[in-house]
Structure formats: C-alpha cells, structure tokens
Amino acid sequence: MRRMLVLMALFVATAAAPAAAGGPLVDAAWLKANLGRPDLVVLDVRGSRQAYMAGHIPGAVHTLYGGKKGWRVNTKTVKGVLPEPAYLERLIGGLGIGNDNHVVIVAGGYGAGEMGTATRVYWTFKVVGHDAVSILDGGMTAWLADRKNPLERGWTPPRPTTFTARLRPELLADADDVRQAQASGTLVDNRPTHQFMGINKSGSVKRHGTVPGAKSVPGVWLTRDDGGLFRNAESIKKLYELAGAPTEGATITFCNTGHWASLGWFVSYEVLGNKQTKLYDGSLADWTVDNKNPVERRVTLP
C-alpha cells in the first residue's frame, strides 16, 4: 500500500511539473504537450489568412509577414528591412506577446524559402532581446502529419499586452561591416546559385553578382530535400565545409533582402552554435545602391 502511494505521488508530481523549455527548434510532439501553457503563444506566420481560418493550431494567433503591419518595412531605397524598435514593440505587444511569453513560430513548412519566414521573424525576436522563442520544425505540415493533432477554425483574436524591446545591435550587420569582412572569407551568400554566379538577379538589386569574397551556401541546402524540416548540425557542417564557408568565428549572412539570409543566420547561430553570426538585412538590395560597393560576377552573359 505504501509503495502504491509513493508511486501515485511521483506520478502526480511528474504530471504537475512544467514541460522542458523548448530550444530553437521544437517538434510537433513538444508543441502538443505544451499547448495550454499560460506563457505560451503560438504565432502562425503563414502567408494566407484564409489558410489560417480554415485550420490552425489551437490558440494560435496570426500575423502577416509583410505589408503595413508586417515584420519588414520599406525605406526610400531598400525594401524589407528591420523596423524601428518602437514599431516592433507595438507589433509584438499587439499580438499578445509580452516579455515573459514563450513564442513558437509556425510557418507552412512547404519548403526552405517558406521556412525563411519563420527564421526571419525568429531573428527579429532575437534582435529585440527576446530569447524565449522557438520554431516549429516542419511547420504546419509537420503538425498536420499526425491526424490526432487538434485543429481550430476561425479567427483567434490576440490579447494585446506590453512588450519592451532590448535591442541587440551585435546581431545586425550593415554595409560598413560587409566592407571590412570582404577579405576575410566570412561572408556567406544564401541566395540560389544562379544569382550568386551572376547568371540572373532579383529585381530588388541593382547589379548582377555577389559581394567579392563571399561563399555560396544556398538556403535550399539547409532543409531536408528543400522541405520544412531543418538538417542536423552534422549535415550542415559538412555542407558549409563543402562550400568553404565558416562554421565558427565572425560571420555575416546576406541574400537579396535578408530573407534567405535569415535561414543561413539561423543554422549558423542556433544549429551550429556560432554566436558571432550577424545578418545583413539590407543585403544586396542595400549594397548595390552605392556604385562604389564592388560586385563580383562569375558569369557574364550578353
């Protein structure tokens, strides 16, 4: 009888204990086990409100990645840069996220580029000093893979609160940082190979090519089969070594407008553990505005 009472007490204590803190990546099982925690906010960053309304993780609030109330703003010369801290405080607080909340970011999970929405929002949280943030590995696709996982339909309104930013400028690179890093081999271009080579370019940049000295690590390499699940540290390290890209020390990731680069920043900073990694959010859209900034084109076509 006494043994049974001890076992029951252990069971109750275990059930009442808080779940383990989530790391940079959490899986669907972890999220399911933690739903209902009063400090947890599930942030749905899928691009379609209709998809969110049709079915989302219970309690999740929706946010738009771009647009007037999105996570990136446009300047006179560059699109999609990091907003001012005051703007982000209003945005984050308006979504019901305070400084004591743990945020789990949920993208669609359809591909590496789409997961870049989650990594860019994740990086933004880190820049404003919020460490209690995770990404659902595999996104909504991973959640839907188990039919036992619950869904909620309709609109879940956020409960606005107050969020105070504590800016971390050490996570953010600018053109001056890139100029200083050109000769060091610490620049990582996360765009597709055809853009890195200068065969094609995005409409957001002025010139073909890349920053001289940059190494190419395309964002599509960083998830398994260009899907929503991130590769593990061992695989990513092998890919970086293949590309001749740094896996430790001062590193700056860039792309066209800081979207693909957020994938590179996330795997370098969080998966590989290189805490000296910065993201150039203006990227080549900003770099190519100034004609004095050099660009290297590996392939010149008529």
Image (cartoon, grey):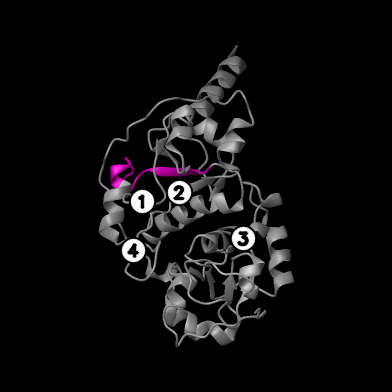
Tell me the kind of residue under disc 1: Gly
Sequence-wise, which precedes: disc 1 or disc 2? 1
- In three-dimensional space, the C-alpha distance between marks 4 and 3, rounded to whole angstroms, equals 26 Å
- Read off the residue under disc 3: 219
Q: Residues within 10 Å of mark 4 (few under 14, many from 20)?
A: some
In front: label 1 or label 2: 1
- Read off the residue under disc 4: 167
Sequence-wise, which precedes: disc 1 or disc 4? 1
Q: Which residues are magenta?
A: 93-107
Determine whether label 3 and label 2 are within 8 Å by CB: no
Q: Position of residue 90 (x, y in %)?
A: 26, 50
- Read off the residue under disc 1: 67
In front: label 3 or label 1: 1
Under tag 3, what secondary structure?
Answer: helix
Under tag 1, what secondary structure?
Answer: loop
Q: Any mark on residue 133, and which?
A: 2
Sequence-wise, which precedes: disc 3 or disc 2? 2
Q: 231 and 102: which one is in front?
A: 231
- In three-dimensional space, the C-alpha distance between marks 4 and 2, rounded to whole angstroms, equals 16 Å
Tell me the kind of residue under disc 4: Leu
- In three-dimensional space, the C-alpha distance between marks 3 and 1, rounded to whole angstroms, equals 24 Å
Q: Residue at x 55, y 79 (%)?
A: 211
